[in-house]
Amino acid sequence: MKTCLITGGLGFIGTNFIKYLASHRKDIAIINADSITYAANPCNIDEKTMVNYKFYKIDIANNDELAEIFKKNKIDYVVNFAAESHVDRSILNPSVFVKTNIEGTLNLLKLSLEHKIEKFLQISTDEVYGSLGKDGLFTEMTPLSPRSPYSASKASADMLVMSFFHTYDMPVLITRCSNNYGQYQFPEKLIPLTIINALTGKDIPLYGDGKNIRDWIYVDDHVRGVLDVLEKGRFGEIYNIGGRSEMQNIGIISLILKKLNKPLSLIKYVKDRAGHDRRYAMDFSKITEELGFKPQLNLNEGLDLTISWYFENEDWWKKIISGDYRHYYKTMYEMR
Ligand code: NAD
Ligand code: TDX
């Protein structure tokens, strides 16, 4: 049996990855290390239903805490999801992004090297490539050009990861994915925010002219791609993962409102995000050709599943919007 240390496993994508791994790979024991920031939800994973699973509440930026996990367990794989992940927050408070996303990743790399782990997979993002014009796609060869403190911290982490490959011959892998949506996403991000505001009759803030484009991928497709790379990826390589589902923000909000039978008058145009990237779109032919990965759900199918999940899991999001973390639910527009 192999043991996989997953960081950030109580957040949106980490939760989905752990659930997928636990049901598809019974021969992998899971250690989940998460500091439980506002974006985490300890209820996401019911420990009673998990076998070969351990949880540690630790901050990856705290090297001593992290070192304890490596001392107590023989770890074979590391998958690093832990991060501060919201661009708007990085504009308000960049320091914590540097701490977690850069220093935390460096701590993980150093300990992984010292303990001679078999594979280190860094979960990165398309945002490290910057912003596209009307045409073209990001490939793995596109130069890094991050434009927000969030994407700069993720690009820095990617460069540290690659430096451990070149310098120490460490067995590293990087995935860079486009915008995820699906179950367990914290409602500060566009799609869950839109669904919840529509369901509760609140305005939906649309930044700028609403024509910025994102390439949406359903989270189940992303986590399958991550496992493909962990199992079959070549060390020292970067793999783009995308959904081939580009849409303007105004389009996605309108589509959700239509599906929910809610009026377009809920949309409120607000001041634009500073440095707002115009368009992201992924060329993910490398992972398709090398590892056979393709997204299985289109945006329409994925949105239907996502809307149903938020509909059926009111308790999950009501605790967020009215509980201890309610101030984090405030849209960034309300905060500035
Ligand atoms: P999230 O904000 O929902 O979850 C992040 C998790 O990391 C939380 O559980 C949080 O408690 C934990 N965490 C934060 N700081 C920590 C620290 N110092 N130590 C330990 N745990 C810490 O984020 P997400 O959307 O699930 O994103 C996960 C990863 O995927 C991130 O690395 C992000 O950059 C990347 N990514 C996200 C998307 C997306 O669309 N959400 C797209 C591409 C890549
Ligand atoms: O209220 C809003 N109104 C709005 O118009 C919010 C929250 C967002 N937006 C716009 C900004 C973006 O163009 O919608 C788009 C999507 O915004 P977010 O959901 O905040 O995602 P984005 O900034 O694109 O980043 C996401 O995808 C890449 C994740 O948060 C990152 O972690 C990931 O790396």
Image: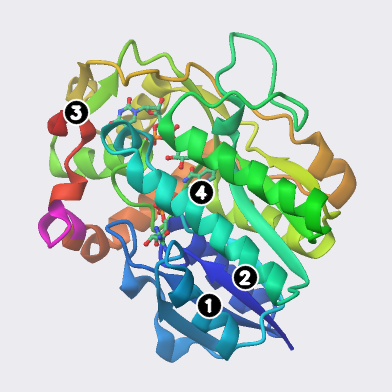
In the image, which residues are magenta? Answer: 320-326
Q: Nearer the viewer, residue 198 or 83?
A: 83
Q: Foreground: 61 or 255? A: 61
Q: Is residue 324 magenta?
A: yes
Report how far apart the C-alphas of labels 3 and 1 lie in the structure. Answer: 39 Å
Q: Residue at x 38, y 52 (%)?
A: 185
Whether the residues at callouts 4 and 2 have beta carbons within 8 Å, the answer is: no
SS of the residue under disc 4: helix
CB atoms at circles 1 and 2 under 8 Å apart?
yes
Task: Give percent across and percent down for residue 66.
Answer: 49, 74
Give the CA distance from mark 3 to mark 2.
39 Å
Q: Quadrant of residue 333?
A: top left
Of the image marks 1 and 2, the number of the one nearer the N terminus: 1
Residue 219 x/y as whole percent: 54, 51
Q: Residues within 10 Å of mark 3 (few under 14, many from 20)?
A: some
Q: Quadrant of the N terminus?
A: bottom right
Residue 333: numbered disc? 3
Q: Is residue 138 magenta?
A: no
Which label sits on residue 102? 4
Q: What distance separates the C-alpha of mark 4 from that of mark 3?
A: 27 Å
Whether label 4 touches label 3, CB < 8 Å: no
Q: Which residue is mark 1?
A: 67
Determine if the C-beta at disc 3 is less than 8 A from ligand 2. yes
Query: Which disc number belongs to residue 111?
Result: 2
Question: Which amino acid does the dot numbered 4 rest on?
Answer: Ile
User: Mark 1: which secondary structure?
Assistant: helix
Residue 228's x, y, as percent?
76, 58
Mark 2 sits near ligand 1, with its Cβ under 8 Å away:
no
Quarter-wise, where is residue 154 in the image?
top right
**Res 182 seen here:** no
